[in-house]
Image (tube, grey):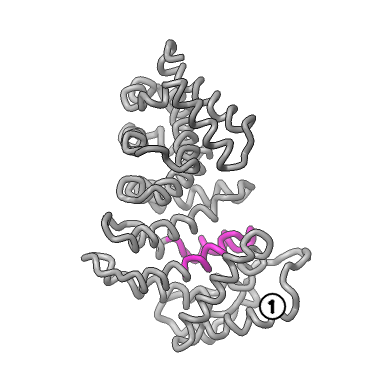
Amino acid sequence: MVNFPESLYDDHKGASSSNSAPQTTARPQFFTAADRAEIQQWINLLNQPQTRAEAITQISNLYRTHKEKGGRELGLLLWNSKGTAFSLLEELLSVYKVLSPSRLRMVQATKVCNALALIQCMATHPEARLELLKAHIPVYIYPLLNTTEKQLPQYDYVRLNSLMVIGALLKVEDLKTTEIVRYLLQSETVPLCLRCMDVGNELTKSMAAYVLGKILGQEEGKFYCGSFTERFFSLSRALSKMVHEFAGKPRPALLKNTLICYLRLSEISRSVGCVDALKKRYPKRLMDPTYLHHVCVIISNTLNIGPYKSSILIEQLRRSSNSLYPFAF
C-alpha cells in the first residue's frame, strides 16, 4: 500500500513509499525543476501540523490554476510523497465531529475542501487512482457526503468537493474503470449520490448526476441498478424529483447530466422489463419537444460541445421517450 499506514493511528513518518509506488513511464513534464523543488517544499510543510493549512492552501491553488496541463503531474508528486495522504485524511477527520449536529463553520469547510482538492488532484492521475482505492481513501470521504443540512452553504461546498473526487476517479474511461465502478458500488456510493441530489444545490446535484451517469454507463452499474426493483425505483424517483424541482433555467451541466442518467435508465428498463415503472416516473417536460429544443440550445451554447453533439443527445432522449410513450413526439 502506497503512502498509507496499516492503521490511521500508526506513526507514518517511518513509512516509505519508494518500493511500492506506481511505476510511471517517461512523459513530458509541465513543471520546471524550480517549480518541482518549490512544490516539494510545500509538500514537506504539508506534513507539519503547524504549517499544514497554509501548505494545503498553496498547493490547492496551484492545482486549480494548472489543473488542465499540470494536474496529473502534481497528483503523482503528492501521492509519491511520504505521509501526504495521511496528512490530508487528518484534515477530513478533523471535521467529522461537527457534521452532525450542524456545527461546521465556513473556515473549517474551506480547509477541508482544499484538502479534498488535493485528493482530487491525485485521483486524476491514471497510475495513482487505483492506489487510492487500495488505500480506501473514498471511504473517508463518504461521511462528508452523508449529510442532510440544506440551509448552510458550507455543507454544500463540502459535498460538492467530495463528489468531485469521485468524479475524478471516473472521468477517464479505460481498463481500470470497471474496477473503480465495482469498488464504488460495493462501498454504496450510489445512495450517497441520491442523497446529494435530494439535499444539494444545483452544482451538487449536477456533480451527483455526473457520477451516477458514469456508473450507470458501465455494465456493472447497469446490473446493480436493474438487479433489484427498489434500486431502480429509487433512482427513477430521485431523478424525477430533481427534474420537477428545476426552477427557471437550470444549469446546462445539470441538464446534460440528468439527461444522460435518463438515457441509462431507459436502457436498463428495456433490458430488465421495467419500462412501465420508468414510464410512471418519467417527467412530462422531458417529453415536450419545445423544452427539449430549448435544452439542446442551452447545452450547445454553454458547454461548447457544439450543436451536433447536443442534438445527438436530445435525439437519443427522444428515442428513449418514444420507447415509453410511442406518440409523445
- Residue beneath the point at 38% across and 58% down: 159
Q: Quadrant of the N terminus?
A: bottom right
Q: Nearer the viewer, residue 222 or 260?
A: 260
**Residue flagged by tag 1: what amino acid is it?**
Arg
- Residue beneath the point at 56% across and 46% down: 178
**Residue on which the image places disc 1:** 36
Q: Furthest residue to the left?
A: 101
Magenta span contains residue 26: no
Q: Is residue 243 above or below residue 329?
A: below
Q: Position of residue 74 (x, y in %)?
A: 63, 69
Q: Is residue 39 above or below residue 146?
A: below
Q: Dot 1 lies on which element?
A: helix
- Residue beneath the point at 54% across and 55% down: 168
Left or right, residue 171 beside residue 91: right
- Residue beneath the point at 42% across and 73% down: 111
Decide: few, some or many residues near mark 1? Use Cα within 10 Å; few <14, some 14-19, many ≥20: some
Q: Position of residue 237 (x, y in %)?
A: 31, 35
Magenta residues (range):
115-138
